[in-house]
Image (cartoon, rainbow, N blue to C red):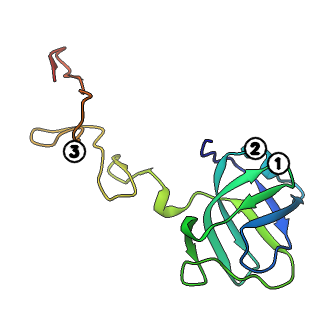
């Protein structure tokens, strides 16, 4: 099961309540269906009725065309970051890249992961290009610009 993010995936749902899955009703005109994600794969989603919203991680299931939703996988919502108890009516549901999961290049040209650390793409004296914290049995091999190797 992979986490898949794809562009222009948008469907509708009339799912009500706060059950375990959204039943998908097919793609909006000009968009792709969640089937692009692939059966059994996870994706980030947003569901909204224009007022309430739920952003989370769901698993697409081709049989029954559903997208799972679980309280543990809600990243943000209009219901205090819990499952939204949906009323009747049509909602839009689409693939999105949640800000708290985004990795981006900042205005200094450094890579910014969601945890607030940064990966310097260029270095100066005293500023490492890569700062790694942690341990384990696997080594990391570094090569400097002069071709020297160190571990």
Residue under label 3 = 133
Residue under label 2 = 39
119 displayed left or right of 65: left
Task: Give the mark nearer the N terminus: 3 vs 2.
Answer: 2
**Real-space Cα separation, disc 2 to disc 1, in angstroms:** 5 Å
Q: Residues within 10 Å of mark 1 (few under 14, many from 20)?
A: some
Does dot 3 land on a helix, a strand or a loop?
loop
Residue under label 1 = 62
**Real-space Cα separation, disc 3 to disc 1, in angstroms:** 40 Å
Q: Report x, y in % for residue 128.
A: 17, 40
Tag 3 and tag 1, C-beta contact below 8 Å? no
Res. 90 image quadrant: bottom right
Q: Report x, y in % for residue 125.
A: 10, 38
Q: Residues within 10 Å of mark 3 (few under 14, many from 20)?
A: few
Task: Give the mark nearer the N terminus: 2 vs 1.
Answer: 2
**Real-space Cα separation, disc 3 to disc 2, in angstroms:** 36 Å
Task: Give the mark nearer the N terminus: 3 vs 1.
Answer: 1
Tag 2 and tag 1, C-beta contact below 8 Å? yes
Q: Is residue 151 above or below residue 133?
A: above
Residue that extends furthest to the top in the rendered view of this protein = 147
**Foreground residue among 48 and 88:** 88
Tag 3 and tag 2, C-beta contact below 8 Å? no
Which one is in front in this view, the residue at disc 3 or the one at disc 2?
Answer: 2
């Amino acid at each position: 099961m992979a986490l898949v993010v794809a562009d222009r995936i948008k469907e509708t749902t009339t799912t009500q309540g706060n059950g375990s899955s959204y039943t998908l009703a097919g793609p909006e005109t000009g968009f792709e269906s969640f089937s692009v994600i692939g059966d059994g794969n996870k994706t980030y989603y947003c569901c909204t009725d224009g007022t309430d919203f739920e952003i989370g991680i769901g698993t697409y299931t081709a049989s029954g065309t559903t997208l799972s939703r679980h309280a543990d996988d809600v990243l943000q919502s209009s219901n205090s970051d819990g499952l939204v108890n949906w009323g009747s009516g049509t909602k839009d549901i689409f693939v999105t890249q949640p800000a708290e999961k985004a990795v981006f290049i900042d205005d200094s040209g450094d890579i910014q992961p969601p945890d607030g650390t940064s990966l310097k793409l260029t270095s100066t004296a005293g500023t490492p290009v890569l700062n790694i914290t942690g341990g384990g049995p696997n080594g990391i091999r570094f090569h400097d610009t002069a071709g020297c190797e160190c571990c």
